[in-house]
Image: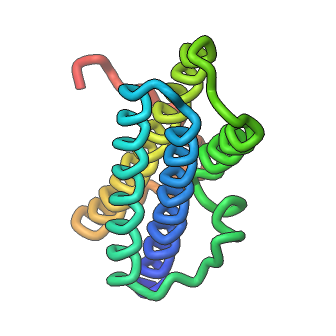
Amino acid sequence: MAKLKQESVADFLHCASILEERAYLFYKSLADKVNLPLINSLLLHIAFDSRKHSVILKGISESIAKPRRQPKDCEKKLFLGRTWTAIERLAGEITRKERIPREHMSSLVEKLMLLESTVGEEYYILVQLKTLQYMTREIREIYNVDFAPMIRNHGMRSYSFPNSL
């Protein structure tokens, strides 16, 4: 069972590293099409951050287990599928343009802010989900309380917590 979880985490991190590499290529391509030096340097900064994230995630993934997923499987099965699609869609828009004119910068910045916000939100949700999974497992092992039937029968959405918590 632990091996399966390790492989699952390794696969997720492997796919996340591929997503970050695609983000790098996207931002690099975008920077090449912008004539404004400040915007160009900011886009390159984001691109290199994505490249760095890709390398780190790949290293962590490979240190856990050998990834089983192929890159083509990542988009369909990855938690970040919505983000993957958004990057691919924006990349398609960018490749059709030779240059990005100054008057389109505002619209582009709005799209990029939405993209980055979505990526951050999806990573955040994943961390919360994994934390909850580990916490419920620990509670079950330490206190012999199993939340699985409650979640199955009622779903977590039906529970609300007081504001004082």
Residue at figure coordinates x 40%, y 72% from the top left: 58
Q: How many marks?
A: 0
> Which quadrant is the C terminus positioned in?
top left
Q: In the figure, 105 relative to 20: above or below?
A: above
Q: Is residue 33 left or right of residue 145?
A: right
The percent coordinates of residue 47 (x first, y second) are: 42, 48
Q: In the figure, 111 relative to 47: above or below?
A: above
Q: Nearer the viewer, residue 94 or 79?
A: 94
Q: In the figure, 142 relative to 128: above or below?
A: below
Residue at figure coordinates x 45%, y 75% from the top left: 10
Residue at figure coordinates x 54%, y 66% from the top left: 15
Quick check: can you spot residue 145? no
Q: Nearer the viewer, residue 160 or 47?
A: 47
Q: Is residue 164 left or right of residue 71?
A: left
Q: Quadrant of residue 110?
A: top right
Specify the color scheme: rainbow
The percent coordinates of residue 103 (x first, y second) are: 61, 11
Q: Is residue 90 left or right of residue 60?
A: right
Quick check: can you spot residue 10? yes
Residue situated furthest right in the rendering = 96
The percent coordinates of residue 62 (x first, y second) are: 39, 82
Q: Nearer the viewer, residue 100 or 74?
A: 100
Residue at figure coordinates x 56%, y 56% from the top left: 22
The percent coordinates of residue 149 (x first, y second) are: 53, 56
